[in-house]
Image: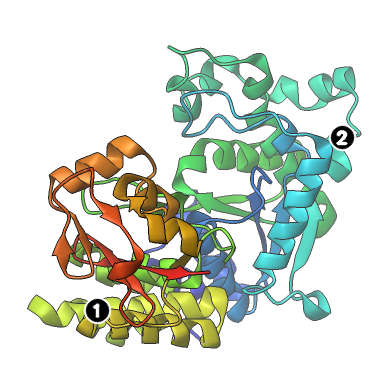
Amino acid sequence: MANVFDTLKERGFIAQTSHEDELRELFANERVTFYTGYDATADSLHVGHFLQAIAMRHMQLAGHRPIVLLGGGTTMVGDPSGRTDMRKMLSEDDINHNAERFKEQLSRFIDFSEDKAIFENNANWLMKLQYIPFLREVGSEFSVNRMLTAECFKSRMEKGLSFLEFNYMIMQAYDFYKLNQLYDCKVQCGGDDQWSNILAGADLVRRKSQNKAYALTFNLLTTSDGKKMGKTMSGALWLDKDKTSPYEFFQYWRNIEDASVEKCLGLLTFLPMDEVRRLGSLEGNKINEAKEVLAYETTKLVHGKEEADKALEAARAIFSSNSISQNAPTTLVDKDKLDNGIDILELLKMTSLAPSSSEARRLIEQGGIVVNDEKVTSKDFKVNSSMLKNDVIMIKKGKKTFHQVKVK
């Protein structure tokens, strides 16, 4: 069997590692227990978490044991990484609710039967810590000068970094130390924006226990110009179908830029790399075939084959002829309201095609809105029941986004 380190490298996951040769040898010679942490800051995972879950699945399929560490304790503090301001403070009840949702979603990708994987929650030790003993045992191992060179802190120095958040790196490092003691966990994984925190954990384990410990980070999902993927008009690209529908999830990947197709196929699907490279090499209109495969495979992993089939059918039906599909995104409106006419600005917000009136006006001014086959040229345009065709009004935003309006 191929070394999973080589598999991850070939598929484009690996960003940085500590002790790379040792780490590769470790994966080759033993069943490795490794962990990835998830702070429960929302009630659903998003597509960045999805990438990490896929990496964990590759490692599990190669015979290694993942620990999913839910951040019941660290979420109480908040990670400053990648933030320009302090995170919203959540109640303990909210954090526990979000952690349960994460557990449910991650179980789609990770097999937790028969000791193949472990769920842990850092609240089990962090919430029980005594302040002075913790400072003496762990705080003494950290240099403030060195901590301030970490990117997660440097980016916050101008706007201010609370002492609360300053503790985060030490708490995450302590998590690695505890998991090493409890489960012989030797590797911490995470997104590359976590490099400083992960490296601090590996260093703490090595200093305090003299055990082997390694840091491994994964590349972030970014476009060709370095912008983070996973943002939609309505916000983040969630794994919860009630927050991002399977069709919207499918359409996101169907519409990504050509330059990112091969990278995303390698990272977000389990297709063989020969097929990934073949699809990624398609040119012109044929690259759309690769995008459709990417959209289908990712949607199938997150939402199951049935929802992926529905999303594919809806996308093909609408793109081929602007025809009606029962699986396309749809907004239901009151008959009386539609009879009287609905302002296009209001309707664009109702359908989430625009988040605000100003954005709706901008789309209209740029010629980006079509109702049925008529381009909307005025912000005073009204949509009414006379426009129903086969009980549907089709709104098109740009070239690729469609939305159906029906009567309740």
| Residue on which the image places disc 2 | 127
Mark 2 element type = loop
Please state the horizontal and vertical placement of residue 237, each as a whole percent of the image.
Answer: 46, 56
Residue sitting at 63 percent across and 29 percent down? 88
Please state the horizontal and vertical placement of residue 167, each as a whole percent of the image.
Answer: 68, 24
Residue type (three-letter) at the residue carrying disc 1: Asn
Q: Give residue 279's quadrant in the image.
A: bottom left
Q: Give the answer, above or below, for where 59 lies relative to 121.
A: below
Residue sitting at 56 percent across and 82 percent down? 304
Q: CA distance from mark 1 to mark 2?
A: 55 Å
- Residue 122 visible in the picture: no
- Residue 135 visible in the picture: yes
Q: Residues within 10 Å of mark 1 (few under 14, many from 20)?
A: some
Residue nearest the viewer, comparing 124 with 336: 336
| Residue on which the image places disc 1 | 322
Residue type (three-letter) at the residue carrying disc 2: Met
Please state the horizontal and vertical placement of residue 181, each as a whole percent of the image.
Answer: 82, 50
Q: Which label's residue is closer to the chain start, 1 or 2?
A: 2
